[in-house]
Amino acid sequence: MDLTNRNELKTLLDRHGLVLAKTYGQHFLVQRTVLEKIIGAAFPSGASSLPVIEVGPGIGTLTRELAAHAPEVIAIERDLRMRAVLAETLADVSPVHVVEADALRVSFTDAVFGKPYRVVSNLPYEISTPFLWKILEEESLRPVSVTLLLQAEVVTRVLERSPHMNLLSLLVAFSGTARRVHSVSRSAFFPPPRVDSAVLHIENISPAVTPVQRRALGLARRAFAAPRKKMSSTLGEEAGKFGEQRPSTLTPEQWLLLAEESRS
């Protein structure tokens, strides 16, 4: 079964009477080279001993590949119409556990019973930013690595550094090492989205947010609420020696220093 074949994909959707819903951001990957780039980034040494959480499996295109490289795949899908499709496309692969839920409301830590895990997903684009905050700040146990197919502009934001830092790029910088793996044109999907995409990979992720990082993120949230203003305007005396600077100009190391100084 080749789910990257447009004809097979259309036949599958027709057989199940499925009309794709814009509200779910359903754009299925139909370019095998992109699929290979995702797998290559997520599993650089081949098969892994860690379970994988996938969000938005859709028809199971990426899920099938993940099942060939991981001992367990937990696929979280909120579109209940996909139940029958996934039952068909994943019938010959294992072990895959399909969880019908909103990924933003599921505890990934609980889903893997507090054990190390990876996240690999062709993510529904409308949840890109809140999803990154969820797995990198809210989860009590962060994934070992994250490999996501996202809007190209979001990947660009994630990789920004001083003097163009933003709140999301600061969170990612506190979490691990991020890189753009591959640029993806809209023609790689069916139906094609209105934007180009890119594969983002984050590795060397520390297990949890440290107390000083959490304080720094709290300060950054307040400062980036008015990104064009000087830090003294948003943080007052807490801005310390960075009062004349704008939040985008601070490096991650300077945010940590500010968090330490503001505590004392």
Image (cartoon, grey):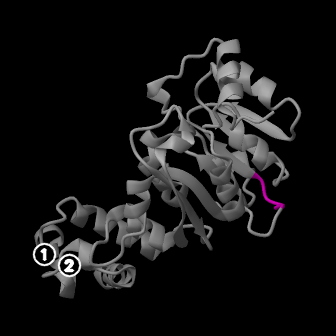
Work out whether residue 88 or residue 189 is closer to the camera in this orientation and state it: 189
The amino acid beneath tag 2 is Ala
Binning the other alpha carbons within 10 Å of mark 1 as few (below 14), some (14 to 19) or many (20 upward) gives some
Horizontal and vertical percent position of residue 139: 56, 55
Q: Main secondary structure of the magenta part?
A: loop
The amino acid beneath tag 1 is Ser
Horizontal and vertical percent position of residue 158: 42, 64
In the image, what residue occupies the spot 13% across and 73% down? 230
In the image, what residue occupies the spot 46% across and 48% down? 128
Give the CA separation, mark 2 to mark 1: 6 Å
Binning the other alpha carbons within 10 Å of mark 2 as few (below 14), some (14 to 19) or many (20 upward) gives many
Q: Quadrant of the C terminus?
A: bottom left
Decide if residue 142 is in sight here.
no
**Residue pointed to by mark 2:** 239
Work out whether residue 67 or residue 253 is closer to the camera in this orientation and state it: 67
Which stretch did the figure color magenta?
A: 47-51
**Residue pointed to by mark 1:** 232
In the image, what residue occupies the spot 47% across and 67% down? 172
